[in-house]
């Protein structure tokens, strides 16, 4: 049975459904599933470097034992397609001198995206795929470029 998650723009009341790719990225998918034992809410921001992506930072406190850093490379890509969910974990001080781990749940909503950051190409784990309501969800994602950050909720189901 597929395990599904829901990603919602809470104020806009627009949501999509995604399937976790346990067959292709088992450790990453399990890490995300475990994380979502309790829903996660926060501000998603439109990416600056990677194209049509909403970057959703997971608070480092949600991983008390740094589980988000312990997933191995699996099902990696540098050219995500619309609907791909991508995981990146950065060690303390690796991302712009931040003394805490940085966890990035990337939501790719459009074409011509790439995982090319100021520090170079960043192969990243593709752990999920949006399977319902991508078009309506993508329309809100695109508005983040002009309107700014938006509240997002990610949960099981």
Image (spheres, rainbow, N blue to C red):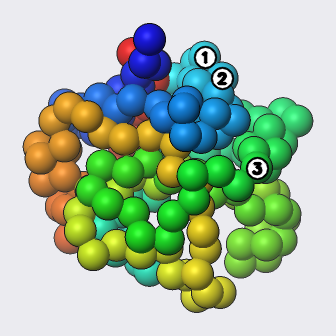
Q: Mark 2 or mark 3: which comes first in sequence?
A: 2
Disc number lying in front (3 or 1): 3
Vertical placement of residue 56 versus 48, above or below: above
- Residue farthest along the top direction in this orientation: 1
Residue at figure coordinates x 69%, y 35% from the top left: 27
Vertical placement of residue 20 versus 24, above or below: above
Please state the horizontal and vertical placement of residue 24, each as a whole percent of the image.
Answer: 55, 40
The residue pinned by badge 3 equals 72
Q: Secondary structure at mark 1?
A: loop
Marks 3/1: CA–CA distance: 21 Å
Vertical placement of residue 131 versus 156, above or below: below
From this viewpoint, is residue 68 visible? yes
From this viewpoint, is residue 43 visible? no
Disc number lying in front (2 or 3): 3
Q: Mark 3 or mark 1: which comes first in sequence?
A: 1
Q: Which mark is residue 81?
A: none
The residue pinned by badge 1 equals 37
Marks 2/1: CA–CA distance: 5 Å
Please state the horizontal and vertical placement of residue 10, each as a whole percent of the image.
Answer: 29, 33
């Amino acid at each position: 049975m597929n395990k599904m998650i829901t990603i919602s723009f809470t104020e806009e009341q627009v949501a999509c459904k995604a399937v976790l790719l346990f067959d292709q990225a088992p450790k990453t998918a399990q890490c995300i599933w475990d994380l979502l034992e309790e829903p996660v809410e926060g501000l998603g921001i439109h990416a600056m470097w990677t194209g049509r992506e909403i970057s959703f930072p997971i608070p480092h406190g949600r991983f008390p034992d740094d589980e988000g850093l312990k997933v191995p490379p699996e099902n990696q890509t540098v050219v995500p397609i619309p609907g791909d969910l991508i995981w990146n974990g950065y060690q303390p001080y690796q991302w712009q001198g931040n003394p805490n781990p940085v966890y990035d749940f990337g939501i790719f909503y459009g074409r011509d995206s790439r995982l090319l950051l100021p520090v170079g190409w960043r192969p990243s784990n593709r752990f999920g795929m949006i399977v319902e309501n991508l078009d309506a969800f993508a329309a809100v994602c695109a508005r983040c470029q002009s309107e700014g950050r938006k509240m997002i909720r990610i949960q099981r189901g």
